[in-house]
Image (cartoon, rainbow, N blue to C red):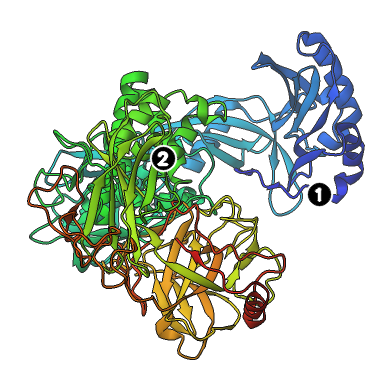
Amino acid sequence: MRQQRAVDLGGAPPRVAAAAWRRLAAELGPNAQAIWDADTHVPTRAWGLGLPADGALASSLVARRVASDFLAAHLDLLAPGARIDDFELVGDDLSAGIRSLGYVQTYHGRRVVGGQLSLRFKHDRLALIGSEAPPHVRAVLTDSPIADDLARTRALEWLRAESPRAAAGAVSAPVILPLVGSGPIRYVEARAVDVTSDQPLGGWTVYVDAATGAPLARVSKFVSATGTVLYHVPERSPSFGERVLRPAPFLDVTIDDVPATTDAAGLVGFDAATVQIGLGVRGEFVRIINKAGELASQVVALDEGSEVQWSGADDPHLDAQLTAYVAANAAKEYVRAIASEPLAWLDGQVNLTVSDNSGACNAMSNGDDLFFYDGNENCENTARIPDVVYHEAGHSVHNQSLIPGVGLFEGALSEGISDYLSATITGDPAMARGFFLDSQPLRDLDPDGFEWHWPEDRGEAHDEGRIIGGTLWDLRTELVAEMGQAEGVAHSDKIWYESIRRASDIPTMYPEALLVDDDDGDLSNGTPHGCLIDQVFYKHGLVGAAILGGKVRTLAAEGDGSVPVALDIQAAQSSCIDLAPTGATLEWRVRGTADFQEAAMTATPEGFAASLPPQQDGTVLEYRVIADLSDGTDTRFPANQAYPWYQRYYGEVVPIWCEGFEGDVSAWTLGSEWEVGAPQGKSGDPGAAFAGSNVAGIDLASDGRYSPQRVMNLTGPVVELPPGFAVYRLQYQRWLNVEDAYFDRAEILVNGELGWRNFNSMMGDNNSDVHHRDSEWSFHDVDITPVTFSGTAQLTFRLSSDGGLELGGWTIDDVCIVGVEEAPPAVCGDGVIAAGEGCDDGNSEDGDGCSATCSVETPEDPTEGAPGTTGGEDTGSDTGAVDDTATGGGASEMGGCGCRSAGGAGGSSAWMLVLAGLGWRRRTRR
């Protein structure tokens, strides 16, 4: 007799059952389905629309009547060759809203072993039909079956060699035994004998021929016999905490040389009292690769109901394999319980390479597989530290769970969120104790007396990651206090997982956390735990600027040449945080210099205001605003670490050629991924053009991000430069998001020569993370005079990407090439600061701060609040043929050359039209 049923899931009925199936399928509807027994050709299960059965759920009699009619109509499909009176009702169960009727099959009054039919009713419909009835039962019956004692004797004779102490018990009445093999099904009248053994432990049902006593088949009663595989591993590390017995889950083993697999609890089933079990370190979800030698394996005896233990306490390389196997499975199981949708990485097999002696004191993930180094005199073999295994698994979970076009993999973020996974599994914010062979942690997410804070604690990725790791741990702590241990941890873990799938860096974890916590799709009205989230993220510096709001504006220049700068402050967006601006400072410097000056800004109804001082024509001034907050922190405008300055150009310029991308752009060559159109606000891109409707940008219409491993060029027409200008400048509006230039380069080329490039922190792989992130339109001035010796200028905006981390890339608008005429000779006393003058107050008198020769006079007692000078800062400098160290922001309301036309601007013909029709137009660009 067969021990396992062979089934066909293909859906097509066997040829012998096709006609009968068509009749049933017509009743079950167009979506009727079945699972077919490959040997008997009957449908083991059939279902579809269901058949009406009014009252069947409430009334057993109604259900039986419906069942009788149904079986009579379809018995040729469900039990070919049988009659309706061959089936006896033995089960009638009503539970879980389902009434189930079960019938056993007989043949001339004898039970057919395993033969049965069943029907299930739900919501007064016959919803599911089952059949395990063998077809066309025909057997030779004897009038004088063998006696019980002879049946016992024949059964024991069959088992004597392997179980000499077996004893026979009850003998059944004659039954019909189907024998399913490679040929036609045979049916034999048999008697079933109950046999048990205590040494070795075992139990069987033995079938012998009812006429002759010949043994036919036996079925073990010990199919549920189990043993447990336990690995003895460090709970935290060999030098911290206890060693514990942990199940080896989903482990590939052998039972008497037959392959088997343990379950989630390390249990494995077998059908004997004692077996020889082969152990290793590879399974369904984890595969160990041992760089220190042979893969761990052993064969040991395992008794039914007992356990086998394997320890590597005295063998570091064995211990590394056992510990890594157990810990990686634990990490997968933990995240599997959090994930809202199946994640292929969790349900696939991951490779763990352990005891690699090519390095030490480290471990890593490549986004999929995990790697662990051997130990030395300074640090532990990292595969022996479960915390480290959990952490590295966190990197792979992060990479594998990212939603394409939504989240981005960023090094510092991944370090922090992986620390959190390790901490939430162990319940200890002090991560990787024992890493350096003592009880001290490698990193602590909850240090005594202070918090990891943005941006002060930015830097190397592991260190910077503590900011978000500490934030998430504190959120977990607060949620546990509010919701209780189980619910608080579960909600914190949910916020962790769903946020890392969508965030692009550490600051973006805040809005993503709010989104996960939200219950109505409206983040403006708060979330169930919004106050708590605000407070925790604020404590780590990740909310301040977002809660404060603010915008910097520059106004029209005053008569004395000074330029008003306003910081408009919005009302605090969260009532949960008592945060308000207490003051603001305006800082400025001449581009290309390190020293900057500053002035306190005056409070206004809208926020704060101050003025940039007059400058000589041709000066590019860089400036920024720092707002002091009531909690002792500050926030800066612009919020761009790679370019923390706005720009303003002083002096008159003559537009030579301009492009606003509103009309014909056929003179431009749009390379890979460049588009002209309305911006969509994706991946950090602007939501609207600087002026008009259109911009030029990379990947405006798709997910907004540039592609990896690609060079993307936007090349403009050749512009003829009229003679007579002392300087030629490129002035345009920029909204750029690009990775640190150590990896991805955003460049401006003029006549093929480099004019500007984004900031390169030169910190090496993974630590070069000063990415250029514009969050507003930025006026940008580039002196292109050194590369315009040919009398023409052709612009190329280029982005070159590497293989990882793609951002929004270039978006540009209001592009102009302008000319600057020779400055007239300076006239001291005319009120205009010209070349060679340190000041000009409109008179020729000494003693008023500006001398009669227009040099600055230094008073003996400076007035309070006068601009001061602070040296030494040069953040934002970058490389290129043209020295340009500034970035702009939304502080340029008057910026732009205003050279937009319905047809756009292109090449020399457009430039000549400006000269012939309008004459020279002068405008101060900023």
The residue wearing badge 1 is: 12
Which part of the image, by quadrant, shows the N terminus?
top right
Q: CA distance from mark 1 to mark 2?
A: 67 Å
- Which amino acid does the dot numbered 2 rest on? Gly
Which sits earlier in the primary sequence, circle 1 or circle 2? 1
Q: Is residue 752 visible?
A: yes
Is 549 above or below relative to 689? Answer: above
Which residue is more in the foreground, 526 or 363? 526
Image coordinates of residue 524 in percent, x first then y, are 51, 29
Residue 550: mark in rendering: 2
Image coordinates of residue 156 in percent, x first then y, are 49, 37
For numbered disc 2, what is the local secondary structure?
loop
Label 2 crowd bin: few (<14), some (14–19), many (20+), radius 10 Å: many
Left or right side of 137 for 351? left
Q: Quadrant of residue 268?
A: top left
Which residue is more in the foreground, 899 or 221? 899
What residue is shown at x 13% (from left), y 42% (from top)?
240
Label 1 crowd bin: few (<14), some (14–19), many (20+), radius 10 Å: some
Q: Is residue 300 visible?
A: no
Which residue is more in the foreground, 732 or 28? 732
Image coordinates of residue 863 in percent, x first then y, are 15, 45
- Which amino acid does the dot numbered 1 rest on? Ala
Left or right side of 637 for 892? right
Q: Quadrant of residue 541?
A: top left
Is 807 above or below relative to 221? Answer: below
What residue is shown at x 38% (from left), y 69% (from top)?
743
Circle 1/circle 2 CB separation < 8 Å: no
